[in-house]
Image: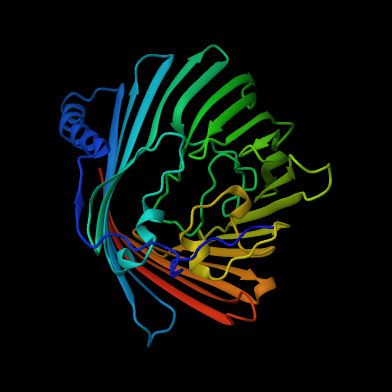
């Protein structure tokens, strides 16, 4: 059974200091070096072995339970920089840094800053550069790896993303670095401190062994086989999750006529229990189709036998996730439609139905391309459901207006 975590309004959270704290951060220093040194160099010389890119966003957000209640208004200035070096045909290195300056009412919530800056990696590469009552400036190195390839062998060591998922919204196969569908402002998704070894047996098949260590010194290790019989990519894996559960699973992706069809299944068995007792299963199935007029439709289903005990939406929304906690209910039904109204203006509407709590999520969004590298977007997220009889039906609305410049 999942133990209930402290929520954001829990009085057990110690209040953070009201005064400001300042410190020099290594990631921010790296950011300045990347931006001022490599940006003009690559622009002027066109070096093909160096890739430098990034973006800067400014996002205004509002959160409330009822329109006549107090609104929590925040602002986020988010910068990301990436420098990838293709040293030669065998060696590639990559370093990527996130810098976030956030201010507003959320920063005053007890415990929120600790959650905001938490680094789940083996090495803590998240640095608080400045912090006050209503603001925080934080910098994180979320990618730092070296890749070596010789013949059919490939080795990658460092902070990286190991993506084993096949579906879009929920990934039970993604045991190394789970992510939340609702975190739309982090398209790169979190990484992990790991060693990954792959051996390619063909153009569409390989063997893989990966191991990671998290901040609690827990080990996740697994081996995977990927094959491609006919028109489907298939994968099979087994290993251990966070030094606690034995895991085994499979996933697939392919097409049924012109529609995409993919899915994932993962079994979890506690190491300290006998086989078949206390175990859990999670599986997701997804299909998508693009019509001739460019209307894109997607459906996805997730089932999880994990016993959840969340008290509200905010507890799930803000706390870090593991693969067993990519949802908060057993049955989840997702649907989404996207349509480009013009080449520069597009819209998306997504929704999730949670039968067990008689609840639902709605998420409309609009995006307009002002220039080739400048976009403005609006996102809305609305949750409604009954977690238990004590708290009754709960509602939560979040809205975001974001301006993004890419370079």
> What residue appears at the point 57 percent right and 36 percent down from the top-left corner?
218
Q: In the depicted view, which residue is nearer to us: 384 or 203?
A: 384
> What residue appears at the point 53 percent right and 33 percent down from the top-left corner?
213
237 left or right of 406?
right
Q: Is residue 239 above or below residue 302?
A: above
Q: Is residue 256 above or below residue 394?
A: above
Q: What colour scheme governs how the chains and residues are painted in the rendered image of this protein? A: rainbow
Q: How many marks?
A: 0
365 left or right of 307?
left
> What residue appears at the point 20 percent right and 35 percent down from the top-left corner?
29
Residue at the limit of the structure toward the bottom, as seen here: 68
* Residue 119 in the image, given as x and y percentages of width and height: 41, 44
* Residue 77 in the image, given as x and y percentages of width and height: 25, 55
Q: Quadrant of the C terminus?
A: top left
* Residue 65 in the image, given as x and y percentages of width and height: 44, 79
* Residue 340 in the image, given as x and y percentages of width and height: 43, 61
Q: Quadrant of the N terminus?
A: bottom right
342 left or right of 324?
left
Q: In the depicted view, which residue is nearer to us: 171 or 49?
A: 171
> What residue appears at the point 48 percent right and 39 percent down from the top-left corner?
215
Q: In the depicted view, which residue is nearer to us: 287 or 242?
A: 242
The answer to which image quadrant residue 70 occupies is bottom left
The answer to which image quadrant residue 268 occupies is top right
């Amino acid at each position: 059974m999942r133990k209930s975590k402290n929520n954001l309004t829990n009085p057990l959270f110690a209040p953070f200091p009201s005064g400001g704290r300042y410190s020099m951060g290594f990631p921010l220093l790296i950011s300045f070096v990347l931006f001022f040194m490599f940006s003009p160099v690559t622009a002027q010389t066109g070096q093909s072995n160096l890739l430098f890119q990034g973006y800067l966003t400014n996002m205004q957000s509002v959160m409330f339970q009822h329109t006549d209640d107090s609104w929590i208004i925040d602002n986020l200035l988010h910068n990301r920089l990436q420098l990838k070096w293709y040293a030669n045909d065998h060696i590639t290195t990559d370093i990527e840094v996130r810098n976030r300056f956030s201010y507003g009412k959320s920063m005053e919530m007890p415990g929120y800053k600790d959650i905001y800056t938490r680094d789940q990696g083996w090495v803590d590469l998240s640095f608080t550069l400045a912090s006050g009552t209503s603001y925080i400036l934080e910098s994180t190195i979320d990618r730092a790896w070296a890749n070596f390839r010789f013949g059919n062998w490939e080795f990658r060591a460092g902070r990286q993303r190991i993506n084993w998922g096949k579906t879009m919204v929920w990934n039970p196969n993604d045991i190394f670095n789970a992510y939340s569908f609702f975190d739309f402002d982090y398209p790169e998704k979190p990484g992990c401190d790991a060693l990954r070894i792959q051996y390619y047996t063909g153009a569409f098949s390989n063997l893989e062994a990966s191991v990671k260590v998290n901040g609690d010194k827990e080990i996740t290790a697994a081996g995977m086989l990927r094959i491609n019989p006919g028109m489907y990519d298939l994968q099979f894996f087994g290993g251990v999750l966070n030094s606690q559960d034995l895991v085994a699973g499979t996933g697939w992706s392919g097409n049924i006529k012109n529609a995409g069809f993919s899915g994932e299944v993962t079994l979890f068995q506690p190491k300290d229990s006998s086989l078949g007792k206390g175990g859990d299963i999670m599986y997701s199935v997804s299909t998508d189709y693009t019509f001739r007029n460019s209307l894109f439709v997607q459906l996805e289903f997730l089932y999880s036998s994990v016993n959840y005990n969340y008290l509200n939406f905010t507890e799930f929304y803000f706390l870090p996730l593991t693969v067993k906690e990519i949802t908060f209910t057993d049955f989840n039904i997702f649907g989404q439609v996207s349509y480009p109204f013009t080449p520069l203006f597009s819209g998306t509407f997504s929704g999730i139905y949670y039968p067990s709590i008689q609840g639902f999520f709605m998420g409309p969004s609009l995006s307009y391309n002002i220039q080739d590298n400048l976009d403005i977007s609006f996102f809305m997220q609305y949750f409604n459901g009954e977690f238990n009889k004590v708290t009754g039906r709960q509602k939560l609305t979040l809205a975001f207006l974001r301006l993004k410049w890419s370079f």
